[in-house]
Image (cartoon, rainbow, N blue to C red):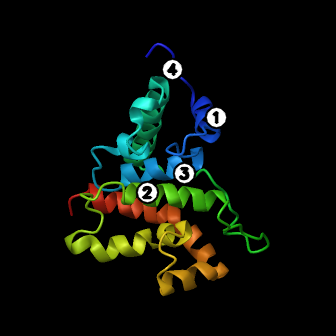
Amino acid sequence: MSNPISLDELAYFLDNSEEEYVLDYIAAHGFLTATVIGPALPNWIDAMFEGHVKDVPENVIDCIHRWRNDIMNDLKNEMPITLPFNEGAGDEDEAVDFSDESDIVAWSIGFVDAMYGDEASEWFEDETEEDVAVLTLPMIVLSGIDNEDPEIAQMHEDQDKLAQMANSIEGNLTELFLLFHTND
């Protein structure tokens, strides 16, 4: 790579791109996290850019690969994923922003996009289906993707429930990683 870019430069590129197929930095982190912790998504980079990967600069693609490897290495070294948002969900005195413009919603949208990025993906297979459904529920509810479901919509309106879900994300990510990447 003749002109590698830093993570800060990648964030600038993602946050300032006018292309509809480019996720912002926060959503991209959610997307990459899902590709690391979940079942294999062989075409993840193509799914991330909705088939426009050839239109993305090579140094951006390289940095995204390095970023994804960093997330994977953290998990392999038993370190929790550092989430790129701090909504204050654990602080009872601080109002939590769960609006459509909040970072936690953007991150959850990216995560869910990767979950459903490949119809052949095996997120909800066999004996792990119920565990995966429970562990991914916070991301699904926070993303707003299934708000037409009355139960999901009701959870989405409950600020206390959203705060509980936000607080569970970090632990759920570790559980999902173990579920998909260990042989018990």
- Crowd around label 1: few <14 · some 14–19 · many ≥20 (10 Å): few
Q: Quadrant of residue 172?
A: bottom left
Upstream in the sequence, badge 2 or badge 4? 4
Q: First in sequence, mark 1 or 3: give its number.
A: 1
Q: Amino acid at mark 1?
A: Tyr
Q: Position of residue 116 (x, y in %)?
A: 36, 60
**Disc on the earlier residue, 1 or 2:** 1
Residue 122 place in picture, x, y as percent: 25, 61
Relative image position of residue 79 (x, y in whole percent):
47, 49
Q: Nearer the viewer, residue 139 or 145?
A: 145
Whole-percent x, y for residue 41 in the image: 30, 49
> Which mark is on residue 12?
1
Disc 2 from disc 4: Cα separation: 27 Å
Question: What's the CA distance linking mark 1 and mark 2?
Answer: 21 Å
Which one is earlier in the sequence, the residue at label 4 or at label 1? Answer: 4
Type of residue at label 2? Asp
Secondary element at image label 2: helix
Residue position for label 3: 27
As measured in the structure, the alpha-carbon distance from the residue carrying label 2 to the one carrying label 3 is 9 Å
Is the Cβ of the residue at disc 2 closer than 8 Å to that at disc 3?
yes
- Closer to the camera, 29 or 182? 29
Indicate the amino acid at tag 3: Ala
Q: Secondary structure at mark 4?
A: loop
Closer to the chain start, of discs 2 and 3, is: 3
Q: Earlier in the sequence, mark 3 or mark 4?
A: 4
Q: Find the distance from the CA under tag 1 to the CA under tag 3.
A: 13 Å
